[in-house]
Image (spheres, helix red, strand yellow):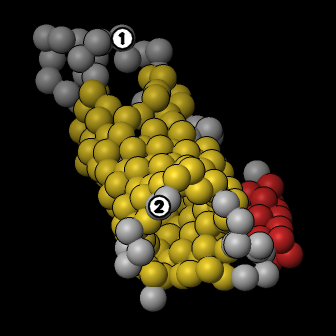
Amino acid sequence: MCNKIFLTIILILNFAAVKAQVIEKHGLLVNGGIGTISYKLDPSLKSKNNEIDFKSSYSVGYRFRLNPHSDPFFIDVDANLGMKLWKSSYIKSSLEPAFYEASSNYDSFSIAGTFNYKIYKGLSGGVGIEPIYFFYQDGESSKNKLDIPLVAKLAYDFGKFEIGVNYKHGLTNTIKTDYIKSGKFRDIQISLFIPF
């Protein structure tokens, strides 16, 4: 699985380097948002009072915007350091207190590649993928440390900065613990891109 992710990253970067010979702009990228976790619990946890709550996600990184022919299509390549914060609480019976609670923090490194289209003036939309490696986990640790979410975004370029909305749909079982059989992150983030 790890080899497939890194092969995907290399292919994206090679494609971007060959296809896009012009770096239109580059600069600081900051993301922050909320989301949900799509999950399946271990069958032994039958209580409906179990709680899995995705609190927030943040990242800071660097973006390269590549535009090969100054046309309406362009490519964004982003390298990010980020974190996801979530909370879990498990109860065997509604009459008993929680037998396990954790506030978890997953720190990550990711490289995103999106193909975008300039819709109207500064408005653009794009789709792509963002392979993520979770290099540090605190709280409820997972056996899986990789994810490859699909990314959809809508942004408006104001010239000196760009504001966007991103949706990231995790595809792999990123959270696999003693109590969670499978868990996938779903993020909605606001992004700020400041070119230099």
Q: Quadrant of the C terminus?
A: bottom left
**Left or right: residue 9 compared with residue 19:** left
Q: How many marks?
A: 2
Residue at horizontal 13 percent and vertical 11 percent from the top: 95
Which residue is at 41% across, 50% downward?
165
Residue 12 position by quadrant: bottom right
- From this view, report whether residue 53 is shown above or below residue 148: above
Q: Which residue is mark 1?
A: 46
Q: Tell me if I can see residue 121 in this picture.
A: yes
Identified by mark 1, the residue type is Lys
Query: What is the residue that sits farthest to the right in this orientation?
Result: 18
Point out residue 29 in the picture as x, y percentages from the top left corner. Answer: 43, 72
Please tell me which residue lies in front, 116 or 133: 116
Instruction: Give the residue at the far front of this rendering.
Output: 121
Residue 10, relative to residue 128: is it above or below? below
Horizontal side, residue 133 vs residue 73: left or right: left
Instruction: Classify 10 Å Cα crowding around label 2: few (below 14), some (14-19), many (20 and above).
Output: few
Q: Pinpoint residue 50: horizontal percent, then vertical percent.
A: 28, 22
Residue 19's quadrant in the figure?
A: bottom right
**Sequence-first tag of 2 and 1:** 1
Q: Residue at x 55, y 45 (%)?
A: 152
Q: Regarding mark 1 in the picture, which secondary structure is present there?
A: loop
Residue 170 placed where, x, y %? 56, 41
Disc 2 to disc 1, C-alpha distance? 50 Å
Tag 2–tag 1 contact (CB < 8 Å): no
The residue nearer to you, when weighing 177 against 120, is 120
Can you tell which of label 2 and label 1 is closer to the viewer?
2
SS type, badge 2: loop
Query: What mark, if any, has residue 143 been given in the picture?
Result: none
Q: What residue sits right under mark 2 in the picture? A: 122
